[in-house]
Every structure is written in structure tokens, then in C-alpha cells.
Image (spheres, rainbow, N blue to C red):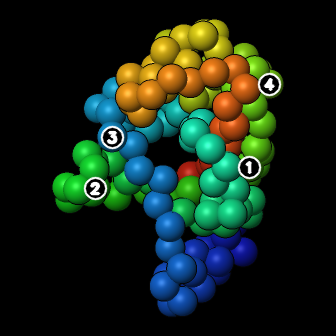
Amino acid sequence: INSVVLNLATYKRRGNMFALNFQSQKHEKLLLDRQKNCTIRLGDVSSIYRENSIVWITTGVKYTTKRKLYSVFLDKVQVKTIAELTSKDLGNQNPDIKTVDQLIENFENIYNKKITHEDTVTVIYFTEVIE
């Protein structure tokens, strides 16, 4: 734990903090209840969110004030196609999404565009950092 706290202090000092922002109130509740430890982001964002990094978890609609919930350690960052997602990926992202097709439908509503099984996503697993 000390190394994680030390890393958080170093990140803050250097100004290298990044955030994983969640716009949905449902996701905010899951995060606050500590029932969500994974996010699936459309595209390859692995160069921004690197394994072993510390980032903030925030909530808020785009272009509005954000609320910081807590800091997290990025345990695993994987780039894969939507077709390669596992039930573990889906369940840890959102317990209500049971299938890849449900995720595609959800993403099409969020991104307002056609999503396929071949689209690239980044799966990010995280754990809370206690400060």
C-alpha cells in the first residue's frame, strides 16, 4: 500500500493525473457501492490509460463540472475486439449487461453510431486506492 500512496503523491506533484469519467447515474451508483471495477471504452485508449497507473474516477456529463469519487490503480488494460470480450469483462463493467449484443446496443446509444463485433475496445480493470 505504501508504494501506491507514494505513487499517488508523485503523480499529483508532477501534474500527471488522468480521469476515467462516467456520465451515467447508474454507473455512479455502482462506483459508489464499489460494485464496478472495470470499464470498457470504445477504441484503443491504452496509450492514455496505462497499466500500473493511478487515475481519478469522476462522474459528470460532458462539458459540465465533474465530481471526483476516488483514485484507482489500473490493474489490467487490454485491447481487444468486442467479440473477444468475456462474461467477466461484461459483468464487472455493468452487471445488467450479460451479452456482447447488449453491450453493442448500449454503446450504439452512447456513441450514436453503428458498432460491430469487430470494433476495438479497451478493457480497464481497476482497484481503489485508499489515501
Q: Return the disc, 4 or 2, that comes first in the chain's sequence.
A: 2
- Residue 83 is situated, as x and y percent measured from the top left of the image, at 75, 21
The answer for how far apart the CA atoms under marks 3 and 4 are is 25 Å
Q: Residue at x 67, y 49 (%)?
A: 44
- The three-letter code of the residue at mark 1 reads Val
Which residue reaches farthest front? 114
The dot on residue 77 is 1
Q: Nearer the viewer, residue 100 or 66?
A: 100
Q: x, y percentage for residue 36? A: 53, 33
In the image, residue 87 sits, relative to residue 46, either above or below, namely above
Q: Which residue is mark 2?
A: 67
**Residue at left 33%, top 40%?**
23
Q: Are marks 1 and 4 in contact (CB under 8 Å)?
A: no
Report crowding for label 2: few under 14, some 14 to 19, many 20 or more residues within 10 A (C-alpha).
some
The location of residue 110, given as percent across then percent down, is: 39, 30
Whether residue 36 is visible here, answered yes or no, is yes
Spatial separation of the CA atoms under disc 1 and disc 2: 24 Å
Mark nearer the N terminus (3 vs 4) = 3
User: SS class of the residue under badge 4?
Assistant: helix
Which amino acid is tagged 4?
A: Glu
